[in-house]
Image: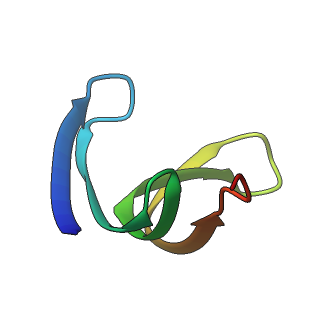
Amino acid sequence: ELYLSTLMQYDNVIPGVSYNARLRWIVNGASNIYLVWNHGLVTETNGLGQPVVAPGNEVIFKVQWDFRN
């Protein structure tokens, strides 16, 4: 089974919208493989303690495997 889910959220502290897309493959039972893509705003500092907001991307690959018989 293969699933695609998406999420969009607004952050009022750092005004902006971030996106999340997750592809989930259920191999069998409790064994899953995920591929996640996050796109949004990243808060960093400029070295003087001032926040800098920049767009950021993150890709995560996760394997969750169940070894029960």
Q: Is residue 8 above or below residue 57?
A: above
In the foreground, 19 or 28: 28
Q: Which residue is most to the right?
A: 47
Tell whether 53 sits left or right of 50: left
Q: Is residue 68 above or below residue 59?
A: above
**Colour logic:** rainbow
Residue at (19, 46) in percent of width and height: 7
Q: Which residue is most to the top?
A: 13
Tell whether 44 sits left or right of 24: right
The quarter of the rendered structure image containing the C terminus is: bottom right
In the foreground, 35 or 47: 35
Residue at (74, 59) in percent of width and height: 67
Which image quarter: residue 10? top left
Q: Where is residue 26 in the image (x, y as percent from the top left)?
A: 36, 65
Residue at (17, 65) in percent of width and height: 4
Q: Is residue 14 above or below residue 21?
A: above
Q: Where is residue 66 in the image (x, y as percent from the top left)?
A: 66, 56
Residue at (77, 40) in percent of width and height: 49
Q: Position of residue 21 (x, y in %)?
A: 26, 63
Tell whether 54 sits left or right of 24: right
In the foreground, 1 or 20: 1
The quarter of the rendered structure image containing the N terminus is: bottom left
